[in-house]
Image (spheres, grey):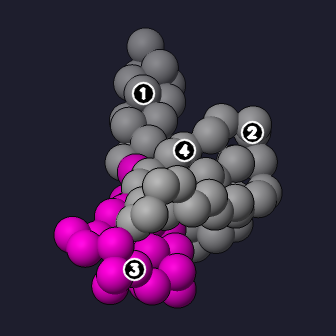
Amino acid sequence: MDLNSYIENIEYFHIGKKTTVCLLTLNNGFEIVATSACLNDMSYKEDIGKAVSKELALQKLYEYLTVKQALDFKKEKK
C-alpha cells in the first residue's frame, strides 16, 4: 500500500524548544497530526524531529486506512 498516494500535503511545525508536529492533509480533506519531542532541547535536530513525526503520522494513516477498509468491507457484506 503506497501511503503517499493518499497524502495531498505535509506541513511541519516547531513548537516550543524541542517538539515537532507533522500535519498530513489527505486527498479527502481528513487531517492526521503526530508529534515528536526530544528529552533535552540542546539535542533538538529539526531533520530528526520531522522524520520521527512523519513516521508516526504515517502509522496513524495506516491505522485509519485499515479501519476504513474494514468498515467498507462490512458495508459490502450487508
Percent position (x, y) of residue 72? 49, 30
Nearest to N terminus: mark 1 or mark 2: 2
Q: Residues within 10 Å of mark 1 (few under 14, many from 20)?
A: few
The magenta region covers 36-61
- Three-letter amino acid code of the residue under disc 1: Leu
Taking the spot 75% from the left edge, 39% from the top edge, the residue there is: 28
Residue at the farthest top position: 78
- Disc 1/disc 2 C-alpha distance (Å): 17 Å
Q: Nearer the viewer, residue 40 or 74?
A: 40
Q: How crowded is mark 4: few (under 14 residues within 10 Å), some or many (20 or more)?
A: some
Residue bearing mark 2: 28
Residue bearing mark 4: 32
- Three-letter amino acid code of the residue under disc 2: Asn
Q: Which of 49 and 25 is in front in this view?
A: 49
Q: Which of 18 and 21 is in front in this view?
A: 18
Query: Circles 1 and 2: CB distance less than 8 Å?
Result: no
